Image (cartoon, rainbow, N blue to C red):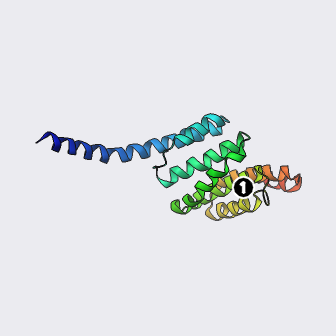
Amino acid sequence: MSGLARMSWLCVAVCLTAGPVAAQDAAQLAAEAGKLHDGFQFAKSLEKYLAIPDTAAPEHRLAKHTGAALSLVNMGRASEAGSHVELARPLVDQVGTDFAMVRFLNVEGLYLNAIKRGDRGLSALHRAEEIAERAGARAALRTVYTSLVIVYQQFEDYERQAYYNQK
């Protein structure tokens, strides 16, 4: 076998194995970023989310942009989060799951609340609530309830805040 043929086979082998490794790396980055975010380490979380490659699968890119947007909102940098919300929007349809839609709507609602636009995210959050209830996604529903508590507290609507706090 000539040197050129060996090099071709080597390139084929690398290409065949690089795809699964990249997907695994993106999933690992998303998981690590999520843990950092849950631990209120928003700057480190943002760094991990942004490290997810733009060539990753749609569900990982959705995690990248929704996670980055939420990290920025939580860091008080909501004005920087809008581009990530918009980049996440088309990915929801590509992923095509109720979980993807609930995740996106929850982040969009918190973003709109942070920038004080429109109904401050309430319609997005209530839509996320409906989808999560219909899908029976209890963990996602708890997350949306927490987001509704935050928004209603800022509206000083303590009756609705208490309602969602008790759900």
Task: Determine the residue positioned at 32% across, 44% down.
Answer: 17
Location of residue 161 in the rendering, given as x and y in whole percent from the top left corner: 83, 53
Above or below, 36 relative to 66: above
Residue type beneath disc 1:
Gly
Q: Which type of secondary structure does the marked residue at label 1 adopt?
A: helix
- Residue at (43% x, 43% y) in the render: 24
Q: Is residue 48 visible?
A: yes
User: Could you tell me which quadrant the N terminus lies in?
Assistant: top left
Is 103 above or below relative to 29? below
Q: Quadrant of the C terminus?
A: bottom right
Residue at the extreme front:
4
For label 1, count other residues whose C-alpha is less than 10 Å away and answer few (under 14), some (14-19) or many (20+).
Answer: many
> In the image, is 27 to the left or to the right of 3?
right
- Residue 48 spot, x, y in % from top left: 55, 38
* Residue depicted at 61% across the width and 38% down the height: 45
* Left or right of 154, for residue 33: left
Asked if residue 76 is positioned above or below residue 155 in the image, the reply reads above
Above or below, 32 against 164 in this view is above
Tally of numbered tags = 1
The location of residue 97, given as percent across then percent down, is 55, 61
Displayed quadrant of residue 41? top right
Left or right, 139 with reference to 23: right
Which residue is tagged 1? 109
Q: Residue at point 51% right, 61% down?
A: 94
Q: Position of residue 138 (x, y in %)?
A: 65, 55
